[in-house]
Structure formats: structure tokens, C-alpha cells
Image (cartoon, grey):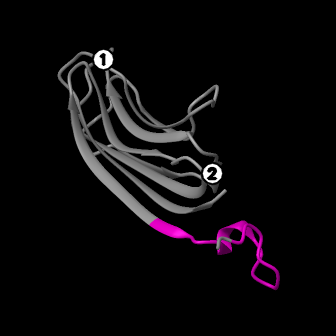
Amino acid sequence: MRIAFPSGTRNLPTDRNPLTIKQGGSQVATGLVTLTMTTYTVPALRRAELVVTISGIVQVAQAAGQNGLVVVTVTGQAASSPAIRFLGGAPIQTADWRQTGTIYLAAGDQVQTQVLNAAGVGSIVADGAAFIVEYDA
């Protein structure tokens, strides 16, 4: 028998059957490319709370008009945030990282970490990691 809302002191949603998920990935973006480091989609009848971290470093200097972007995208979000931007002319070893606050997702929502690089000789090494607590809806 499944009890939807248990009585007592442990009646918060995160206390009902939580599952911890950790994802991480790394990509090297050279030339005109978009690469995905991590993807997480909340399963049916579940919810999730997560924190996402992204980082990037210029491995080969960006050309004058070449821009790069390391980004977190969330389903239904009008603009991506946070994002790391490497502008044209960025020298070797230019690095940065960002971390989200807690993101709350419902069933079917998706979060991705991606690296995008414009055409040119420069390359970016990017990392993305998601730390997720998934629980019954």
C-alpha cells in the first residue's frame, strides 16, 4: 500500500523516496560546433531539485570574431542562465565558472549543460555537472 502523504514529522515531498543523481561531462569545442555535456529529464510522476555547475577554459586562442559560450539551459526558460562567454580574441588560459542556485523542476522538464563555439581556430574545454535530488511528485 502506498501512502501519498504520510503523517508525522517527515511529510515534506523531499522525504518521500528521494533519489540522488550526479552527472558530469566534459567536451572540447573546436570550430563551429554545439556540444552537450549533460542532459537530465525529470521522469513522469517525479520532481527534482538540482544545482548545476559549469566551467570553461580557452585551450586555443579565439579568433577576432569567434565567440564561445558555456551555458545551462532549462525547459521553458526564456533566457539561458548562467552562461560563460568567451569573446573574440580571448587568449589561451582564459577561464571562468558559474553555479546555479537551486533549480526546481516538474515531470518532463529538462536541464542541459552545453558548449557552443563559433567558426574559427579557437577551442574551448568545457565541463558541466548536475547534482540532483529526485523525489515523488
Residue 22 drawn in magenta: no
* SS state under label 2: strand
Q: Residue furthest front?
A: 1
Task: Name the residue beneath numbered marker 2.
Answer: 103
The magenta segment is: 3-20
- Image mark for residue 64: 1
- Identify which amino acid the numbered label 2 is placed on: Ile
* SS state under label 1: loop
Location of the C terminus by quadrant is bottom right
- Vertical placement of residue 99 versus 109, above or below: below
Neighbours of disc 2 within 10 Å: few (<14), some (14-19), many (20+): few
Q: Position of residue 71 (x, y in %)?
A: 45, 37
Q: Position of residue 114 (x, y in %)?
A: 38, 36
Identify the image quadrant of residue 69. Answer: top left
Q: Is residue 40 left or right of residue 78?
A: left
Neighbours of disc 1 within 10 Å: few (<14), some (14-19), many (20+): few
Residue at 42% across / 49% down in the picture? 54
